Amino acid sequence: MTVLDDPVSPGTPPEVRQAAAGAAPGWPLVLYFHHVHPTLDHYTSLTPGAFERGLETVLAEYGPALDPADVRADLDPPAGPRVLITFDDGHRDNLEHALPVLDRLGVRALFFVITGLADAAPDRSMTWDEVADLVADGHRAGSHTVTHRKLPALGPDEQRTEITRSLAAVRDRLGDPAPPLAHPYGLRPAAGAVPDGVLAFGTVKAPPRPWTAAPHDIRRTYLPAGREDSWPRLCRDWRRQWWHPSP
Protein backbone atom coordinates (compact mmCIF):
# COMPACT_ATOMS: atom_id res chain seq x y z
CA MET A 1 0.00 0.00 0.00
CA THR A 2 1.34 3.44 -0.92
CA VAL A 3 1.19 5.98 1.89
CA LEU A 4 0.84 9.62 0.95
CA ASP A 5 3.79 11.75 2.06
CA ASP A 6 1.64 14.73 2.85
CA PRO A 7 -2.19 14.62 2.92
CA VAL A 8 -2.43 18.35 2.22
CA SER A 9 0.17 18.65 -0.54
CA PRO A 10 -0.75 19.87 -4.03
CA GLY A 11 -2.76 17.21 -5.80
CA THR A 12 -4.17 15.78 -2.60
CA PRO A 13 -7.71 14.44 -3.18
CA PRO A 14 -10.30 16.91 -1.86
CA GLU A 15 -11.85 14.39 0.53
CA VAL A 16 -8.44 13.90 2.16
CA ARG A 17 -7.78 17.63 2.26
CA GLN A 18 -11.12 18.22 4.00
CA ALA A 19 -10.24 15.65 6.65
CA ALA A 20 -6.74 16.95 7.38
CA ALA A 21 -7.62 19.34 10.20
CA GLY A 22 -8.36 17.37 13.34
CA ALA A 23 -9.19 19.15 16.58
CA ALA A 24 -8.09 22.26 18.41
CA PRO A 25 -4.88 21.72 20.39
CA GLY A 26 -5.60 20.00 23.68
CA TRP A 27 -9.10 18.86 22.70
CA PRO A 28 -10.34 15.41 21.66
CA LEU A 29 -10.28 14.36 18.05
CA VAL A 30 -13.85 13.48 17.04
CA LEU A 31 -14.34 11.07 14.14
CA TYR A 32 -17.68 10.49 12.47
CA PHE A 33 -18.90 7.54 10.44
CA HIS A 34 -22.11 6.76 8.58
CA HIS A 35 -22.42 3.38 6.87
CA VAL A 36 -20.39 0.26 7.63
CA HIS A 37 -21.44 -2.34 5.08
CA PRO A 38 -19.70 -5.05 3.03
CA THR A 39 -21.23 -4.14 -0.35
CA LEU A 40 -22.90 -0.71 -0.16
CA ASP A 41 -21.48 1.64 -2.80
CA HIS A 42 -21.76 5.03 -1.13
CA TYR A 43 -19.23 7.78 -0.52
CA THR A 44 -19.77 7.56 3.25
CA SER A 45 -19.56 3.76 3.44
CA LEU A 46 -16.67 1.66 4.73
CA THR A 47 -16.53 -2.11 4.58
CA PRO A 48 -16.30 -3.83 7.98
CA GLY A 49 -12.68 -4.74 7.22
CA ALA A 50 -11.75 -1.18 6.31
CA PHE A 51 -13.58 0.13 9.36
CA GLU A 52 -11.63 -2.21 11.62
CA ARG A 53 -8.30 -1.31 10.02
CA GLY A 54 -9.16 2.37 10.34
CA LEU A 55 -10.01 2.11 14.02
CA GLU A 56 -6.85 0.11 14.67
CA THR A 57 -4.80 2.83 12.96
CA VAL A 58 -6.48 5.56 15.01
CA LEU A 59 -6.17 3.69 18.31
CA ALA A 60 -2.48 3.00 17.65
CA GLU A 61 -1.95 6.78 17.79
CA TYR A 62 -4.51 7.67 20.46
CA GLY A 63 -4.85 4.70 22.78
CA PRO A 64 -8.26 3.80 24.25
CA ALA A 65 -11.15 5.78 22.82
CA LEU A 66 -12.88 8.42 24.92
CA ASP A 67 -15.90 7.09 26.80
CA PRO A 68 -18.97 8.83 25.32
CA ALA A 69 -20.43 9.03 28.83
CA ASP A 70 -17.73 11.63 29.53
CA VAL A 71 -18.91 13.91 26.71
CA ARG A 72 -20.56 16.83 28.46
CA ALA A 73 -20.56 20.61 28.39
CA ASP A 74 -18.18 20.88 31.35
CA LEU A 75 -15.64 18.40 29.96
CA ASP A 76 -12.10 19.31 30.96
CA PRO A 77 -9.49 18.97 28.20
CA PRO A 78 -7.83 15.55 28.52
CA ALA A 79 -4.26 15.18 29.73
CA GLY A 80 -3.18 13.66 26.42
CA PRO A 81 -4.51 13.01 22.91
CA ARG A 82 -7.89 11.25 22.95
CA VAL A 83 -10.37 10.27 20.25
CA LEU A 84 -14.17 10.06 20.32
CA ILE A 85 -15.92 7.76 17.84
CA THR A 86 -19.33 8.87 16.55
CA PHE A 87 -21.91 7.65 14.03
CA ASP A 88 -24.59 9.65 12.25
CA ASP A 89 -28.11 8.64 11.19
CA GLY A 90 -28.68 5.43 13.18
CA HIS A 91 -28.29 3.15 10.16
CA ARG A 92 -29.11 -0.51 10.71
CA ASP A 93 -25.74 -1.54 9.30
CA ASN A 94 -24.10 0.15 12.31
CA LEU A 95 -25.71 -2.54 14.45
CA GLU A 96 -25.03 -5.40 12.07
CA HIS A 97 -21.51 -4.58 10.88
CA ALA A 98 -19.93 -1.80 12.97
CA LEU A 99 -20.91 -3.06 16.42
CA PRO A 100 -18.97 -6.36 16.19
CA VAL A 101 -15.83 -4.37 15.31
CA LEU A 102 -16.39 -1.93 18.17
CA ASP A 103 -16.83 -4.86 20.55
CA ARG A 104 -13.64 -6.58 19.37
CA LEU A 105 -11.63 -3.39 19.86
CA GLY A 106 -13.26 -2.39 23.15
CA VAL A 107 -14.58 0.90 21.77
CA ARG A 108 -17.73 2.61 22.99
CA ALA A 109 -19.27 5.06 20.53
CA LEU A 110 -21.77 7.90 20.35
CA PHE A 111 -24.66 7.25 17.93
CA PHE A 112 -26.60 10.28 16.67
CA VAL A 113 -30.13 9.09 15.90
CA ILE A 114 -32.74 10.61 13.59
CA THR A 115 -35.52 10.29 16.14
CA GLY A 116 -38.36 10.38 13.61
CA LEU A 117 -36.97 7.28 11.87
CA ALA A 118 -36.43 5.13 14.95
CA ASP A 119 -39.25 2.54 14.88
CA ALA A 120 -40.64 4.16 11.69
CA ALA A 121 -38.13 2.56 9.30
CA PRO A 122 -36.82 -0.64 10.93
CA ASP A 123 -35.65 -2.00 7.59
CA ARG A 124 -32.95 0.66 7.38
CA SER A 125 -32.70 2.27 10.83
CA MET A 126 -32.20 1.00 14.36
CA THR A 127 -35.29 0.83 16.56
CA TRP A 128 -35.54 2.51 19.95
CA ASP A 129 -35.21 -0.87 21.66
CA GLU A 130 -32.01 -1.56 19.73
CA VAL A 131 -30.61 1.85 20.59
CA ALA A 132 -31.50 1.22 24.24
CA ASP A 133 -29.56 -2.04 24.09
CA LEU A 134 -26.53 -0.14 22.78
CA VAL A 135 -26.81 2.30 25.66
CA ALA A 136 -27.09 -0.57 28.14
CA ASP A 137 -23.82 -1.94 26.71
CA GLY A 138 -21.97 1.32 27.39
CA HIS A 139 -22.53 3.21 24.16
CA ARG A 140 -24.42 6.50 24.05
CA ALA A 141 -27.09 8.03 21.84
CA GLY A 142 -27.59 11.63 20.82
CA SER A 143 -29.92 13.63 18.60
CA HIS A 144 -29.57 14.04 14.85
CA THR A 145 -32.86 15.99 14.77
CA VAL A 146 -36.33 14.60 14.06
CA THR A 147 -36.28 14.46 10.25
CA HIS A 148 -32.67 15.22 9.17
CA ARG A 149 -33.64 18.29 7.17
CA LYS A 150 -31.14 21.03 6.41
CA LEU A 151 -31.64 23.30 9.39
CA PRO A 152 -30.62 26.62 7.75
CA ALA A 153 -33.39 26.07 5.16
CA LEU A 154 -36.03 26.12 7.92
CA GLY A 155 -37.48 29.04 9.82
CA PRO A 156 -36.21 29.73 13.35
CA ASP A 157 -39.22 28.09 15.02
CA GLU A 158 -38.92 24.95 12.86
CA GLN A 159 -35.22 24.72 13.62
CA ARG A 160 -35.85 24.85 17.35
CA THR A 161 -38.64 22.27 17.04
CA GLU A 162 -36.44 19.85 15.10
CA ILE A 163 -33.75 20.13 17.75
CA THR A 164 -35.72 20.31 20.98
CA ARG A 165 -38.18 17.54 20.10
CA SER A 166 -35.40 15.17 19.13
CA LEU A 167 -33.41 15.96 22.28
CA ALA A 168 -36.56 15.36 24.34
CA ALA A 169 -37.11 12.01 22.61
CA VAL A 170 -33.60 10.86 23.50
CA ARG A 171 -34.04 12.01 27.09
CA ASP A 172 -37.43 10.35 27.47
CA ARG A 173 -36.62 7.10 25.67
CA LEU A 174 -33.11 6.54 26.97
CA GLY A 175 -32.90 8.43 30.24
CA ASP A 176 -29.97 10.63 29.22
CA PRO A 177 -30.43 13.98 31.01
CA ALA A 178 -28.15 15.92 28.65
CA PRO A 179 -27.89 14.25 25.24
CA PRO A 180 -25.60 15.82 22.64
CA LEU A 181 -26.65 16.88 19.15
CA ALA A 182 -25.17 16.53 15.66
CA HIS A 183 -26.23 18.92 12.91
CA PRO A 184 -27.53 17.21 9.74
CA TYR A 185 -25.08 17.74 6.88
CA GLY A 186 -22.88 19.70 9.29
CA LEU A 187 -24.99 22.82 8.69
CA ARG A 188 -25.17 24.96 11.79
CA PRO A 189 -28.64 26.30 12.69
CA ALA A 190 -29.51 29.87 13.58
CA ALA A 191 -28.26 31.43 16.79
CA GLY A 192 -30.47 30.41 19.68
CA ALA A 193 -31.80 27.24 18.04
CA VAL A 194 -29.60 24.97 20.16
CA PRO A 195 -30.50 25.11 23.86
CA ASP A 196 -27.89 26.34 26.29
CA GLY A 197 -25.87 23.55 27.84
CA VAL A 198 -26.21 21.22 24.84
CA LEU A 199 -23.03 20.13 23.08
CA ALA A 200 -23.58 20.18 19.32
CA PHE A 201 -21.26 18.62 16.77
CA GLY A 202 -20.63 19.68 13.20
CA THR A 203 -18.53 18.05 10.49
CA VAL A 204 -15.46 19.04 8.50
CA LYS A 205 -17.33 22.26 7.68
CA ALA A 206 -16.59 23.44 11.24
CA PRO A 207 -13.13 24.83 12.03
CA PRO A 208 -11.11 23.21 14.82
CA ARG A 209 -11.87 25.25 17.95
CA PRO A 210 -11.94 24.46 21.68
CA TRP A 211 -15.24 23.02 22.83
CA THR A 212 -15.58 25.88 25.28
CA ALA A 213 -15.31 28.42 22.44
CA ALA A 214 -17.67 26.64 20.01
CA PRO A 215 -19.93 24.34 22.04
CA HIS A 216 -22.59 24.38 19.31
CA ASP A 217 -20.31 23.59 16.34
CA ILE A 218 -17.59 21.16 17.41
CA ARG A 219 -15.49 19.96 14.52
CA ARG A 220 -15.54 16.32 13.53
CA THR A 221 -13.44 14.73 10.82
CA TYR A 222 -13.37 11.35 9.10
CA LEU A 223 -11.36 8.57 7.50
CA PRO A 224 -11.96 9.16 3.77
CA ALA A 225 -13.66 6.16 2.15
CA GLY A 226 -11.61 4.72 -0.69
CA ARG A 227 -8.48 6.58 0.47
CA GLU A 228 -7.08 4.08 2.94
CA ASP A 229 -3.55 4.99 1.83
CA SER A 230 -4.01 8.39 3.50
CA TRP A 231 -5.17 7.11 6.89
CA PRO A 232 -1.83 6.47 8.64
CA ARG A 233 -0.52 9.93 7.86
CA LEU A 234 -3.81 11.59 8.73
CA CYS A 235 -3.81 9.85 12.12
CA ARG A 236 -0.24 10.90 12.84
CA ASP A 237 -0.98 14.49 11.84
CA TRP A 238 -4.17 14.60 13.90
CA ARG A 239 -2.21 13.46 16.93
CA ARG A 240 0.45 16.14 16.36
CA GLN A 241 -2.30 18.73 16.21
CA TRP A 242 -3.11 17.99 19.84
CA TRP A 243 0.01 20.06 20.63
CA HIS A 244 0.08 22.36 17.61
CA PRO A 245 -2.68 23.97 15.51
CA SER A 246 -3.34 22.60 12.04
CA PRO A 247 -1.90 24.73 9.21
Image (cartoon, rainbow, N blue to C red):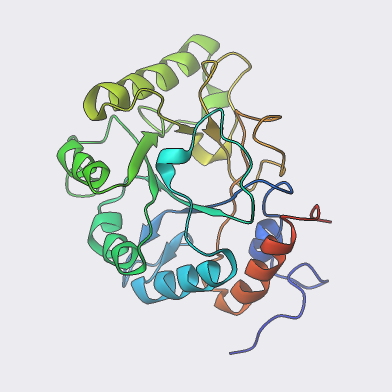
Quarter-of-image position of residue 106: bottom left
Q: Vertical placement of 180 versus 205: above or below?
A: above
Quarter-of-image position of residue 9: bottom right
Q: Vertical placement of 36 versus 171: above or below?
A: below
Q: Quadrant of the N terminus?
A: bottom right
Expressed as whole percent of the image width and height from the top left, the position of residue 10 reads 83, 71
Q: Vertical placement of 112 versus 240: above or below?
A: above
Left or right of 202 in this view: 129: left
Front residue of 27 and 116: 27
Left or right of 89 in this view: 195: right
User: Residue at image x 35%, y 22%?
Assistant: 177
Q: Quadrant of the C terminus?
A: bottom right
Expressed as whole percent of the image width and height from the top left, the position of residue 6 reads 77, 74
Quarter-of-image position of residue 207: top right
Expressed as whole percent of the image width and height from the top left, the position of residue 237 reads 71, 66
Q: Vertical placement of 17 versus 159: above or below?
A: below
Q: Residue furthest top?
A: 157
Expressed as whole percent of the image width and height from the top left, the position of residue 176 reads 32, 28
Q: Residue furthest front?
A: 79
Front residue of 38 and 153: 38
Left or right of 100 in this view: 55: right
Front residue of 196 and 63: 63
- Tell how many labels: 0
User: Residue at image x 36%, y 68%?
Assistant: 105
